[in-house]
Amino acid sequence: MPKALITGITGQDGSYLAEFLLARGYDVVGMLRRSSTVNFERIDHIQNDITLAPGDLIDGASMVQVLREHEPDEVYNLAAQSFVQTSFGQAVLTGETTALGVTRLLDAIRMVNPDIRFYQASSSEMFGKVHEVPQKEDTPFHPRSPYGVAKVYGHWITVNYRESYDMHASSGILFNHESPRRGLEFVTRKITDAAARIKLGMQNEVRLGNLDAQRDWGFAGDYVEAMWMMLQQEVPDDYVICMGETHSVREFCQLAFGALDLDWEKYVVIDPAFYRPAEVDLLIGDRTKANEKLGWEPKTSFEELVRMMVEADLKALQG
Ligand code: NAP
Ligand code: GDD
């Protein structure tokens, strides 16, 4: 039975990837950082099928310990301080986890077993102020946030360890992917949760920032398959994973409120508190390489994703 270690198992992607690997017969170990309250909302339903191991991206020795004890064949590094807005206020912390954390984990792998296959969660946020449209693997990076800068570091250190030490280390440059398990601070889930609350009379408005920002949004459940596919290749490489279409935040509002027969313009209030010091205006990816080399294709359309999220929020709030 192959064994996989997932960092960030309690996050959106960690939970979907764990389900995906369990269904393929993997023994799944999830690295968990210490917190004063239990944070298993997304993995409650699979808790008995996985093993949890204490460790933190800030602490290299803890990851050496996890690798020694559990001896995984594959490591998926999904842990990060992943919220762009927070990275402006906590730039150093973001660098410690999202950037240097990658090096600590790669070093731990080198020390314990350099044959472990490694996946790094790179991000379309690295393209930032985009140098070409659509963005592909060789599009230059121009990050616009401390988070984006940290991800560029994590990306290049992965490439560097692959080239320096012949490690099977791959990066997935994933564009925004969402789901009913998305954190409430991200714009899509903030909108679908608010729309459901407004429909049920629990809330009167939702305050948002830049409605003109455009993102290439897909379904997280589809994207985790691409992570696994990358580690099954003979040769490690980097791949853009995206839908190849872009939509504005305004359009997301229209669809989400529309799914509940609500007029979004009556409820959305612009609040500059949600503007960012520097913005990523437009993201749209080109997944040709992933399609040709991995055979990966998304299964869920943008419209299906919005509806899925709205329906899940409505159902959860209705109890
Ligand atoms: P998420 O829901 O925010 O999950 C982040 C995970 O990282 C959580 O499990 C969190 O643990 C863990 N974590 C944070 N700091 C840690 C530390 N110091 N040590 C150990 N674990 C730590 O993120 P996601 O949406 O699943 O994204 C997964 C990865 O893909 C992230 O690296 C993200 O930056 C990247 N990415 C995401 C997208 C996207 O659209 N979702 C796109 C491109 C790249 P707690 O539960 O304890 O907080
Ligand atoms: N969060 C948030 N809240 N964003 C808002 C709001 C709001 O009230 N109003 C407008 N936006 C805009 C942001 O300014 C941004 O342009 C866009 O909505 C998307 O914001 P987020 O949902 O926070 O995601 P993100 O694109 O910044 O980052 C996500 O995607 C990256 C991949 O491109 C995160 O998942 C990152 O971890 C990931 O790497």
Image: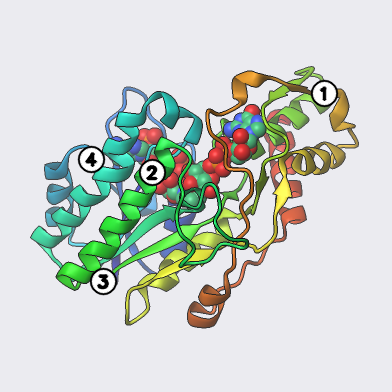
Can you tell me whether the CB of the residue at mark 3 lies under 8 Å from the nearest atom of ligand 1? Answer: no
**For mark 4, does the 10 Å Cα neighbourhood hold few (<14), some (14 to 19), or many (20 or more) residues?**
few
Observer-nearest of 79 and 87:
87
Say which mark, if any, is on residue 267: 1
Mark before the other along the chain sequence, 1 or 2: 2
Separation (CA) of disc 1 from disc 2: 35 Å
Coordinates of residue 245 in the picture (x, y in percent): 70, 60
Amino acid type, mark 2: Val
Mark before the other along the chain sequence, 3 or 2: 2
Mark before the other along the chain sequence, 4 or 3: 4
Q: Nearer the viewer, mark 3 or mark 2?
A: 2
Separation (CA) of disc 1 from disc 3: 49 Å
Residue at mark 2? 149
Mark before the other along the chain sequence, 1 or 3: 3
Amino acid type, mark 1: Tyr
178 sits to left or right of 95: right
Amino acid type, mark 4: Pro
The residue that appears at 79% across and 24% down in the rendered structure is 198
Coordinates of residue 42 in the picture (x, y in percent): 49, 42
Separation (CA) of disc 4 from disc 3: 25 Å
Say which mark, if any, is on residue 54: 4
Residue at mark 3? 168
**For mark 3, does the 10 Å Cα neighbourhood hold few (<14), some (14 to 19), or many (20 or more) residues?**
many
Q: Please indicate, yes or no, whether residue 133 appears anywhere in the rendered image.
A: yes
SS label for mark 2: helix
Can you tell me whether the CB of the residue at mark 1 lies under 8 Å from the nearest atom of ligand 2? Answer: no
Amino acid type, mark 3: His
Coordinates of residue 293 in the picture (x, y in percent): 48, 81
Mark before the other along the chain sequence, 4 or 1: 4
Q: Nearer the viewer, mark 4 or mark 2?
A: 2
Coordinates of residue 35 in the picture (x, y in percent): 31, 27
**For mark 2, does the 10 Å Cα neighbourhood hold few (<14), some (14 to 19), or many (20 or more) residues?**
many
